[in-house]
């Protein structure tokens, strides 16, 4: 490794964050995908969590609302991942109303159908949440 | 108008907000588009600003970062509007670093090329800003 | 409100149109979404129906075929809304063959998979329609 | 060729249509692309014009407005082709106002930035048109 | 037909290829869609198989991996077609590992959610395959 | 770092690969983006090159053709990155004809306009290449 590179172990940072926000995620990814795509689970933890979400500068809640915005505008074709991020946003303190507002705002960029679809995905998460309490 | 509808004059709210964030925008839109699409300028003010951005619940800075996230993930095909929103985000107090962070995070949802393109669009806005000061 | 603005009550126009094309829609939207996103139902009626579909210049059938074209090319990720618009197109006099033709044409812009998906969505609507008769 | 297949020479039909709507197009495509992609020019004529636009059932103007709708909602990333179709729509009798209306309507499905971008592309075509007259 | 045009019967070539890779496909398409969109089945065979996949220059396996890449990056909104192409790739000799690798690589262009969705679609195909053996 | 994790230094692998395929890339990214997004250059090398392209299983040429396919189907909104990948594909031995074929094939998934746009981007790269020789 180049001596001049200020190497940061993003895997460790990502692991800490992912275990806090999504406990058990890496193990679940490994169980499902490791035989087919060796390294996938580690890459998700190292890259998504370690190299992006753990960077600071912007707080977790804003980051998650931004992600929800993007996945909504992209047309909710990735519904399961949208729902994972909605759950994470609730976990870090976003309210249902804030999440719904950000989704609603995406009407302006992704159109009405994308917004309604994402809102329906969110309502499923909110309902599950309330059932659990 | 139905008496039972709790009618809110979203145009007036949108006008106040748009004049604060983007002074002169409605007039500019009217001058350019009114002959071709009567009502376009009013619709932008009433809908985009009045019916969405002025709603409260989520603060302006978070809303604009969410919009920047969405336009980045959509592939920056709407570069001029991305730049308008980046400028608006600066105007309401977002730092260049925060805007860049949110764009960088979109690598995870829109991929590296979309992220780099959006970052280049942002740098243009930041440079213009610094030249003006 | 600015005296010079030729204010049009687009909500009333949208309400009339939406009740004709999709009777009961605003109430359904209000029942499902109002607690979470206050104003959503009114916004759909005022904006989608009042500020766009009710504008004239282009007839309803052409407008709906254009919408079906767009939702097809966008990849049918918004299948329920595509089906609502297909049903509306039938309601204003488009034939099944015309709707299918427009979807088929979208092969050129959204590709074969998007076209086949949208056609399958249309066939479901056509089948329901025939069952009802 | 299978005797049972009701073979239609879509190339000839496409050629007739493309020469009427876009005279010289196949030759231009051949000059630019034939060495690199043998058959591309013939494929455009045979497929796009012969197998889709020449099919009947829906009139040319409606077909072109549907195409303009789709390209607008897709984010105008294909600006040159959007402009070709806008010019073709004018050629078959669509008015500037109708084209602008369909683009404006796409706000509902592709968002405001996509709509504004497409409208700007259209205005360029309209201006060129007026200069030529 | 123009005498100068080096006419190639792409339908026959497409038919041979499609019967080898997807036996019975044209008949299935005809049974399902012919009444609604006359010519659709022939167009798929002639265009998709005859005018594109049968062209040579690039081998079938590379072509199918490229298609899988594109459908993954587009967000798997066309899941059934993605699965058809994954099955075809297996049929022409691609391994499960290679298909999974190409899907995984698309993280860089379509993001993590699109990649995970496509991988899940692939696993379904792989599981079906193994059950059949 | 967890002792059980089979840690691979993907940065070093990515650096070796990126210097071979795109010499000077990390330095250029660092010069342009480091002040704004600390770590971006290292992330591109570590993630894009180290964690994806350097993985083996699929050869570099096939990987690059898959990337070109994806960026074409996404609508070439990321033209500069499409061109970088086209140049890389030439560097690892893909012919102009193969690259053009894969782009042409994307007509089936991204439509004709996306294909033509990508082909034009490729021709620019091919012309530059020939000028340099």
Image (spheres, coloured by chain):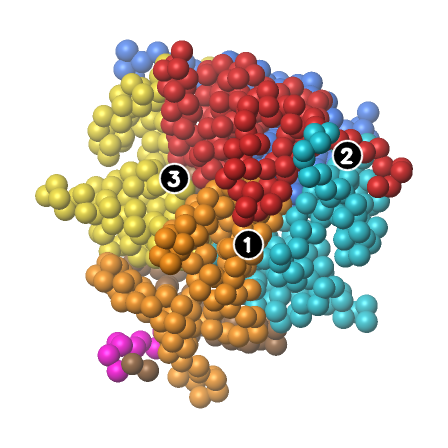
Chain colours: A yellow, B brown, C orange, D cyan, E red, F blue
Percent position (x, y) of residue C29? 29, 62
Q: Is residue A7 left or right of residue C109?
A: left
Percent position (x, y) of residue A106? 40, 55
User: Is disc 2 placed on a helix, strand or loop?
Assistant: loop
Q: CA distance from mark 2 to mark 3?
A: 37 Å
Magenta segment includes F61: no
Q: CA distance from mark 1 to mark 2?
A: 31 Å
Please tell me the numbered disc located at residue D39. Answer: 2
In which quadrant will I find the C terminus of chain A? top left
Pointer 1 chain? C
Q: Are marks 1 and 3 in contact (CB under 8 Å)?
A: no
For the image, the number of numbered tags is 3
Magenta segment includes B4: yes
Q: Is residue D4 above or below residue D73?
A: above
Please tell me the numbered disc located at residue C97. Answer: 1
- Identify the residue at image location x=72%, y=60%: D87
Which segment is the magenta one?
A: B3-10
- Identify the residue at image location x=41%, y=50%: C127
Locate residue C36: give its quadrant: bottom left
Task: Determine the main secondary structure of the stretch shown in magenta.
Answer: loop
Depth order, front residue of B43/B103: B43
- Identify the residue at image location x=25%, y=41%: A87
Depth order, front residue of E107/E16: E16
- Identify the residue at image location x=71%, y=22%: E57
Please tell me how crowded label 1 is: few (under 14), some (14-19), or many (20+) other residues with Cα within 10 Å: some
User: Is disc 1 placed on a helix, strand or loop?
Assistant: helix
């Amino acid at each position: 490794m180049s001596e001049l590179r200020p190497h940061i172990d993003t895997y460790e940072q990502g692991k800490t964050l992912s275990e806090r926000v999504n406990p058990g995620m890496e193990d679940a990814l490994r169980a499902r995908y490791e035989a087919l795509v060796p390294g996938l689970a580690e890459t998700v933890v190292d890259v998504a969590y370690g190299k992006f979400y753990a960077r600071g500068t912007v707080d977790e809640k804003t980051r998650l609302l931004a992600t929800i915005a993007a996945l909504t505008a992209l047309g909710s074709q990735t519904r399961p991942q949208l729902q994972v991020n909605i759950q994470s946003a609730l976990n870090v303190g976003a309210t249902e109303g804030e999440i719904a507002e950000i989704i609603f705002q995406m009407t302006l960029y992704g159109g009405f159908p994308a917004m309604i679809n994402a809102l329906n995905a969110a309502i499923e998460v909110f309902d599950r949440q309330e059932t659990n309490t």
